[in-house]
Amino acid sequence: MTALTAAVQGRTAAERIMLDTCTIRRKTGTAFDETTGRYTDTTTTVYTGKCKLQDRIIQGESEAGGREVITLSSVLHLPVPVTAVQVDDVAEVTASQDPAAVGRKLRVAQVHYKSYATARQLQVEDVTG
């Protein structure tokens, strides 16, 4: 079996467990809303489809006082062929195996690239406000 064959099989397996769905949008500008008297962002959809959201716990020692610091890092997994997503795009979870995740909005902080990847991994952070 070649590395490419293994990667293709891994992609198929990874997509099988992408049971959530999300829509990813990119800001294209702003528009004035005459009804509210405010400017609102205009967006375009760059992806709609299957995904998987995972939180990773990262443990480490702080430089101040040597205390252990625990950080939660969120990663959004998409099928590998999805290439249009960029940093600062915003993903919204539209359906999930975890009901608490539905409606969660996540800003793409990093897009990871990897030879023989089984999923497109996006480092994401919660959008507040």
Image (cartoon, grey):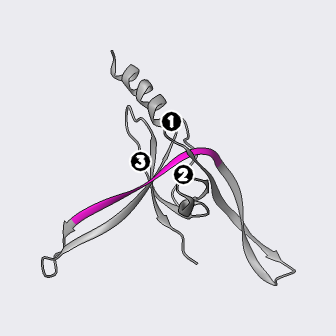
Q: How crowded is mark 3: few (under 14 residues within 10 Å), some or many (20 or more)?
A: few
Secondary element type, mark 2: loop
Query: What is the magenta range?
Result: 47-59
The x and y percentages for residue 40 are 73, 74
Find disc 2 in the rendering and name its residue: 97
Q: Are marks 1 and 2 in contact (CB under 8 Å)?
A: no
Find disc 3 in the rendering and name its residue: 112
Q: Which residue lies furthest to the bottom in this view?
A: 37
The x and y percentages for residue 29 are 70, 66
Which tag is nearer the camera, tag 1 or tag 2? 2
Which tag is nearer the camera, tag 1 or tag 3? 1
The label number, if any, that marks residue 15 in the structure image: 1
Secondary element type, mark 1: helix
Secondary element type, mark 3: loop
The label number, if any, that marks residue 92 in the structure image: none
Q: Distance between the residues labelled 1 and 3?
A: 17 Å
